[in-house]
Amino acid sequence: MHPLAIIAIFVSYSALLFIIAAITGRKSTNETYFTGNKSSPWIVVAYGMIGASLSGVTFISIPGEVGGSGFSYLMIVFGYLIGYAIIAQVLLPLYYSRNLTSIYAYLEQRFGNYTYKTGSSFFLLSRSIGSSFRVYLVVNVLQIFVFDNWGVPFAINVAIFMGLILLYTFRGGIKTIVWTDTLQTTFMLAAVAVSVYYISTDLGLGLKSLFNEVVSSEYSKIVFTDVNDKRFFVKQFISGIFIAIVMTGLDQDMMQKNLTCRNLKDAKKNIYFLSWALIPVNLLFLFLGASLYMYATKMGISIPQSTDDLFPIIALKYHGAFAGTVFLIGLVAAAFSSADGSLTALTTSFTVDILGIKKKEIMLETKKVKLRMMVHLSIAVYLTLLVVVFRAISDQSVINKLFTIAGYTYGPLLGLYTFGLFTRLNVYDKWVPVIAILSPVLSYLLSINSEYLFDGYKFGFELLLVNGIFTFIGLLILSKKKPISVQ
């Protein structure tokens, strides 16, 4: 596609987001920004969260991963069902009963200020690195196909992108994002559906015939029984349970959307709908991945070294203008979906948890709004710099390590919440940060030595559970003799 056409698509989609922002941002306050005034219809939240759950990584990477992992990712998605049920029955009642704006305020109520700041800081670190990485993946595609042709530096590209997100979330915050997420989900799914249709047409197959071809191919294998294989189905399933719990239930970005629902009953409906909807949605992405590999083989297209590039290359170079247009809108939607919710959640966590804006009762509301806006702007600049750093590193192995490090920080959150919810013990609050730092370090050391220690076994996503267990044990060691009197 011509670069001007790509820019036109980008601008048009951005304009649509600004229209939604103008409507949802009317008469907004800090309460609107943080909680959406608790007025969001649950079905709108649930549908929008599909796109937020997928993000740019899923949009580009999951189809590419099919070549090496088949449909094994589906076992993780099946694990989500249990994880989301735990969120609905355990975590959501906790958050709603305590009327929390930031979910990490629970840690202060349960343990104390040091634990509270630790939990929030771990989220800020993890979400900022993770979101920047996801934005980098998508914006980098725009750089390659558009801005490199015009000699525009990558930093300018990122600044424009983050500037747009800053502007349309500036006033409405989470209330705006709940509605823009629905748009982003729609275009992401449309891009996949259109690509599947064009593949079936180019191959001279109907959709039913393509389906049969995929099912009978090597790519459709779901269950891998080798216990030492990273795709081992039990490991994948258990990992899915805890990935859902920590990356949705203990993540301010995802939970902030849930907390905009009118009541607990609606929030539970949202979570259960989302958990079941993710099965056919992820199956669609996996089906696309298998179709892309079959298409590349039959058309003599070389599989790129980075499988993340397979979907963009075929969509933009082989499927014509319409399919390319839909793909680009889906790509832009994935990028916006990865960044806008994170920007709002990071702003909320820093403003509420670190600066303690809710506790500043004597501060005028107008000053609170100005403070929140300053934080919002600062976080946007910070994320922009992180994305630029990813590009400057230009070493995929280093970037993956940073992304892995971000993932390690969810383990302590899992341990903290599990200890808080399922024991009545108290801890020495000031020592909790030490445990929260040691647990990921021990998990990493265990991971790099696991093949030697456990006869070839290599940890995957389940290391998250091990990390949480280390934290739990550390808290148990630090626990006070006298239990708390009130949970």
Image (cartoon, helix red, strand yellow):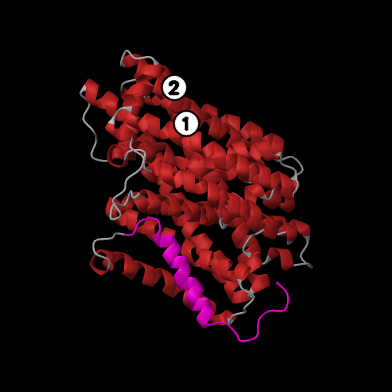
The mark tally for this picture is: 2
**Which is nearer the eye, 425 or 101?**
425
Picture coordinates of residue 259 (x, y %)? 68, 50
Could you tell me the amino acid type at mark 2? Val
Disc 2 crowd, CA 10 A, few/some/many (<14, 14-19, 20+): some
Q: Which residue is mark 2?
A: 194
Picture coordinates of residue 66 (x, y %)? 33, 37
Label 2, label 1: how far apart the Cα atoms are:
11 Å
Which numbered tag is attached to residue 454?
none
Residue at position x 53%, y 27% in the image: 12
Picture coordinates of residue 451 (x, y %)? 25, 63
Whether 291 is drawn above or below 207: the answer is: below
Residue at position x 62%, y 45% in the image: 271
For the N terminus, the quadrant is: top left
Whether 419 is drawn above or below 157: the answer is: below
**Residue 207 sits in which quadrant?**
top left
Picture coordinates of residue 60 (x, y %)? 39, 37
**Which is nearer the eye, 69 or 199?**
69
Residue 172 in sight: no
**Which is nearer the eye, 423 or 133?**
423
Q: Which residue is mark 1?
A: 330
- What range is drawn magenta here? 459-487
Work out whether mark 2 precedes mark 1 in sequence or the reverse, and give the earlier one. Answer: 2
Whether 160 is drawn above or below 410: the answer is: above
Question: What secondary structure is found at the residue carrying circle 2?
Answer: helix
Q: Are marks 2 and 1 in contact (CB under 8 Å)?
A: no
Relative side of 233 to 338, left or right = left
